[in-house]
Amino acid sequence: MSGPRRDPDMIRPYVRTQGRIRAHDDVRLESVVIAATGPTDTLAPDARRVMRLFAGADGGLAVADIAAALELPPSTVRILVSALMDSGHLASPAPAAEDQPDFDLLQEVLRGLRSMV
Amino acid sequence: MDCAPWSDLPEPSVTYVPATVTRSAKIVVAGGFGVGKTTLIGSVSEVRPLRMEEPITQASAGVDDLRRAPHKTTTTVAMDFGRIHMAGGRIALYLFGLPGQSRFQPLWEDLAEGALGCLVLADTRDLDASHDALGLLDGADIPYAVAINAFAEAPVYPEEELREALALDADAPLTVCDARDRTSSLHALITLTEYLSEHRSAALMESRR
Ligand SMILES: Nc1nc2c(ncn2[C@@H]2O[C@H](COP(=O)(O)OP(=O)(O)OP(=O)(O)O)[C@@H](O)[C@H]2O)c(=O)[nH]1
Ligand SMILES: [Mg+2]
């Protein structure tokens, strides 16, 4: 059997990310996730390392925080987090009541920055 | 059961996002080498700034040579970032620094996606170093403001000359900051965010016409 050899650079992230090859569009570098529930013993090593970061956590972590803590490429962590959200191990923080219905992120950020000076 | 070599190592300590945070936002800080991106992020961040590393694989030869000489090189691009909590702890604002070279385009797209906007730092001793960042921004349709990081030794030019040298859009804000100073850096971010807010209102008006 012949054919183009697979690019080793492509295979490695694929293995690391439990078969997922793309991140969800809304899982970005700044997206914050919190731990949900689910057995972690069947997870691949990198996914387990992500979940281990949340052990005893008193809050969430953004994709970038996870990439920095585990020294993994952020593109890989985006995919890992997407897979762990699919499997229910991680979740987005529940929206606060006051976020609805017309929470204006940009105005809140502007207000927040002004209040710091 | 397999036991990976790292499994006994303690995981590094992390600063969690407070449990009150329900929303996050991002601003990108771009600019040429040594212009002060890391310094600005460090002056405003409420947590110790962190660094991520993304390996990027590039053909080392021109595209035409790929078949004959399929050499690839891997470069690691470091991106540092900081975090500010606001709105009574409901929002985490992330600030990401990225060197503005066009060869980092693949990363740029990941970073730019969903960003509120971008603060471009420039040094008057090397304004050309800002062109790559500005070119990426124009291509990515992401609104930005420019802040001259005022190094003591750097020459001071009238605003009009700077705008011309940077080929800035008439409506893009141009301000001055000292990246080492927290308040000054915050003012640069406020200038950007005010512009983003106006920019959005203008876009809304346009779409209603
Ligand atoms: N005098 C002066 N020095 C500054 C200022 N901002 C940064 N520096 C210094 O300039 C040097 C480069 O600053 P960095 O913040 O590392 O620049 P950078 O843009 O992150 O650089 P790269 O990541 O290497 O592209 C450091 O030694 C800073 O201390 C400033 O406003 N005034
Ligand atoms: Mg830097």
Image: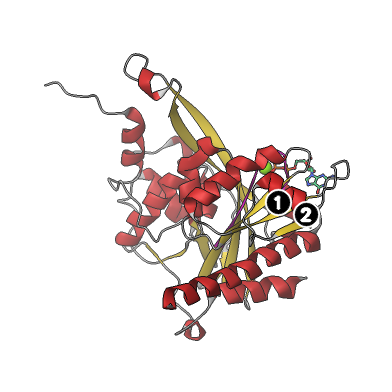
Q: Position of residue A12 (x, y in %)?
A: 35, 35
Circle 2 marks a residue in which chain? B
What residue lies at 78% left-to-right and 54% top-to-bottom?
B159
Q: Is residue B37 magenta?
A: yes
- Where is ligand 2, by quadrant? top right
Q: Position of residue A60 (x, y in %)?
A: 51, 64
Q: In the drawing, what numbered circle is on residue B159?
A: 2
Q: Can you identify the residue that label 1 sits on?
A: B163
Kind of residue at badge 2: Glu
Circle 1 marks a residue in which chain? B
Residue found at the very far left of the displayed protein? A1
Please say if B110 is above or below B117: above
Position of A21 compared to B9: left or right? left
In this orientation, which residue lies closer to the viewer: A76 or B14?
A76
Q: Residues within 10 Å of mark 2 (few under 14, many from 20)?
A: few
| Mark 2 Cβ inside 8 Å of ligand 1 | no
Q: Position of residue B30 (x, y in %)?
A: 62, 48
Q: Is residue B72 magenta?
A: no
Q: Which residues are magenta?
A: B26-38
Please say if A81 is above or below B106: below
Cβ–Cβ below 8 Å for labels 2 and 1?
Answer: yes
Q: Which quadrant of the figure has residue B47?
A: bottom right
